[in-house]
Image (cartoon, grey):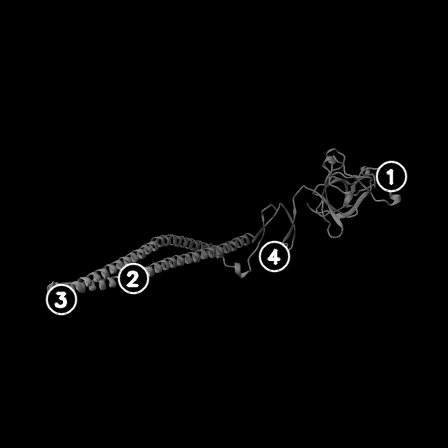
Amino acid sequence: MEKGQKIVSLAELDSRFLDSTQLKTMLAQKTSLIAKRDALKARAEALGDQVAASTGVRKAAVPATIERVKQANDRVYQAEQAVEAAKQSLKTAQWQSDRVDSLYNDGLRSKRDKELAELDTIRSKTELERALAALDVAKEDASISVLENKRTDADTGGNINAIKAARADANQLVASTDAEIYKLQIDIDNFTKRVDQRTVDAPCTGRIVRLMRVGAGAMVNAGDVLAVIAPHTQDRAAEINIRDWDAPLVSVGRPVRLQIAGWPALQFIGWPRIAIGTFAGVVSVIDATDDGKNRYRVIVEPDKNAIDNKQADPWPSTTFLRPGAQVTGWILLSDVPLWYELWRQLNGWQPTIQPQDPSNPNNLLIQTDPTVKDNAKRKSP
């Protein structure tokens, strides 16, 4: 089986995903929401233009009413001056009428002169009454112009505030529509991913070794394992576990001797070079934390240098070395004299670690040559 080849085809049972035109419908809804959002944005922009225009009208209308108030006040002042002039004219006419009347009584003026003087007095009274009436009218106009100024200011301000409120509502609807579009886009993406997941493809080139769900119509749930695939690969590695007691003695690059199940071997403790049937490896990875049982996982890869230099036999081919085969490993420490090792074991001392080599901080110097041994099953890389 090649990578990407279809393994399983799944069918929907959820009523939310049975409609074959659901994706098309959601895309149409998204298009409609986008058009609605664009229309709302255009409305918001138009309302913004109306705010600018109304602000301009306000800037022109309010000063105009203020000028009309000033003009009305000027007319009031003119009317007041006219009243004062009419009063003075009336006083002059009355004085002239009294003087003519006195001269008439003395026989110095004619009756006609007396009548003309009285007529002037009457005319002056009439002018005064007209001036007073004009003054009242001017005062009323001034009051009306003040009210007109206040009304214009209130009307234009209220109109601008109403347009701003409408624009805020339009912007709120734009934001709400954006939220609906984002939510719908998430649903579209989820639906598209779900449609893509209806077909399960091979993640790698290999062979199906076990079917966990057999036959058409089998029910599967999220997280179910459908099949187990053994990959086609020439990469090999062994996984062994060591105790926390031995973990400080192991570092990346340490040589390892492996005994693989199915290959007869003889391992001599302390003499790895004369081991028979074992294979050379090297520590490539050490887990930073334990597995919860005070054990640390160590990944061992083939020792390519030893194999290339004919100092060790190559690992068995993947044709014979199957994933999951059991393996026993011996992690080799530094060389020490035999008498020292015997003396250490007789005294029951543990191997000790000297300070690190400054030239190679990853290399730990160990003062003994015991073996760190533990059994583990080899997993596929």
Front label number (4 vs 1): 1
How much space separates mark 1 and mark 3, taking CA atoms?
168 Å
Give the quadrant of residue 252: top right
Left or right, residue 147 beside residue 209 = left
Give the mark nearest the N terminus, 4 or 1.
4
Q: Residue 228: give x, y in percent of width and height.
A: 65, 51
Tell which circle, 1 or 3, labels the residue nearer the N-terminal end: 3
Nearer the observer: mark 2 or 1; the answer is 2
Residue at left offset 87%, top offset 43%:
345
Q: Is residue 234 above or below residue 53?
A: above
Q: Secondary structure at mark 4?
A: loop
Q: Among all residues in the image, which is located at the extreme bottom?
A: 105
- Confirm whether residue 115 shows in the render: no
- Give the mark toward the camera: 1 or 3: 3
Question: Which is more N-terminal, label 3 or label 4?
Answer: 3
Tell me the element at label 2. Answer: helix
What's under tag 3, amino acid-wise?
Asn
Residue 105, numbered circle: 3
Q: Nearer the viewer, mark 2 or mark 3?
A: 3
Mark 1 nearby-residue class (10 Å; few <14, some 14–19, many ≥20): few
What residue is pinned by disc 4? Answer: 222
Q: Secondary structure at mark 3?
A: helix
Looking at the rendering, in which quadrant would you find the C terminus? top right
Where is mark 1, residue-wise? 340
Question: Does residue 305 appear in the picture of this structure?
Answer: yes
Density class for disc 2 (Cα within 10 Å; few <14, some 14-19, many ≥20) is some
Q: CA distance from mark 2 to mark 3?
A: 45 Å
Question: Would you name the residue on which mark 2 appears?
Answer: 139
**Vertical order, 110 against 381 (above or below):** below
Give percent across and percent down for residue 288: 71, 46
